Amino acid sequence: MRRIFIISSVLLFLGQSSWSQENFDMWYKLSPEIRMNRENKAWEIRWRPDDHIIIPSIKQYIGKNNIGRTDIMIGANIGSFKLFNYWKLDDLGRVWSGIRFDYNTAMFNKKLLINIQERLFFGLNEKSDNHYYLIQYIRYKVSKKVQAGVLSYGKWEFDAPFNEQHWFVGPTANFGLPYNFNFHVAITKSIFFNNTYMTFIRVGYRIKLKDKGN
């Protein structure tokens, strides 16, 4: 717990030092996730019951400053790759279906971990725009339970101008917790919008089903 506090404090300090002398817009993304898979099997299910984003500036457009969303992913591991069918819906009535493609690799005696994700979504109603994500997640194993690195998170809507897209980059830390829990925090800055930041927090829980007879 001490390491979680120290590293989280360092991330907050790094972010604070960059915006303390300016007006800024802070976004928050809170994303609990449950993962389930069976021992020695390739398939995996992921569920985010309330992937929640808080953006103060959107209140003037939708009447509130937050959007809640539910995500469901069903996929399989194929060597260093993962491929998911991905469905999501939010409390604005938007619904999407898409695919998520992950590439994972490790270097330097498996100390440096690299994850690259691509996600492509198609809207299932007129409210829902087609869009694409590119996520780059690089981290180094500080210890058995602690990783630190950089998160890069980009989103593009097909019909929106390029200068209205989103791309955030910043330091990140990941902590393995008891009872199969995991805590991930990142403090990121927008590349496209001046003085716009996002704090990303995820608490994950993994369920691994045992094979019969084990």
Image (tube, rainbow, N blue to C red):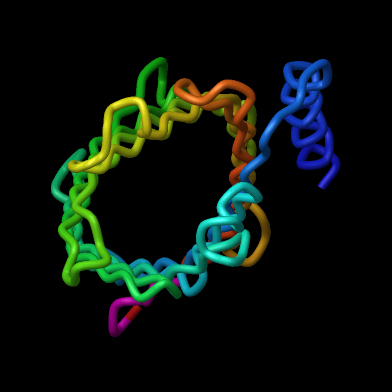
What is the number of callouts on the image?
A: 0
* Residue 96 at x, y percent in the picture: 23, 65
User: To which quarter of the image does residue 35 belong?
Assistant: bottom left
* Residue 60 at x, y percent in the picture: 59, 56
Question: In this view of the protein, which residue sits in the foreground, 185 or 70?
Answer: 70
Quarter containing the C terminus: bottom left
Looking at the image, which residue sits at the far bottom? 212
| 14 left or right of 181 in image | right
Taking the image as drawn, is residue 40 in sight?
yes
User: To which quarter of the image does residue 113 belong?
Assistant: top left
126 magenta-colored: no
Q: Say which residue appears at 85% left-offset and 41% top-offset.
A: 2
Task: Classify 137 as above or below 179.
Answer: above
Q: What range of the chain is rendered magenta?
A: 207-213
* Residue 28 at x, y percent in the picture: 63, 48
| 74 left or right of 176 in image | left
Q: Say which residue appears at 59% left-offset and 62% top-offset.
A: 66
Taking the image as drawn, is residue 144 in sight?
no
211 magenta-colored: yes
Q: Say which residue appears at 60% left-offset and 38% top-offset.
A: 198
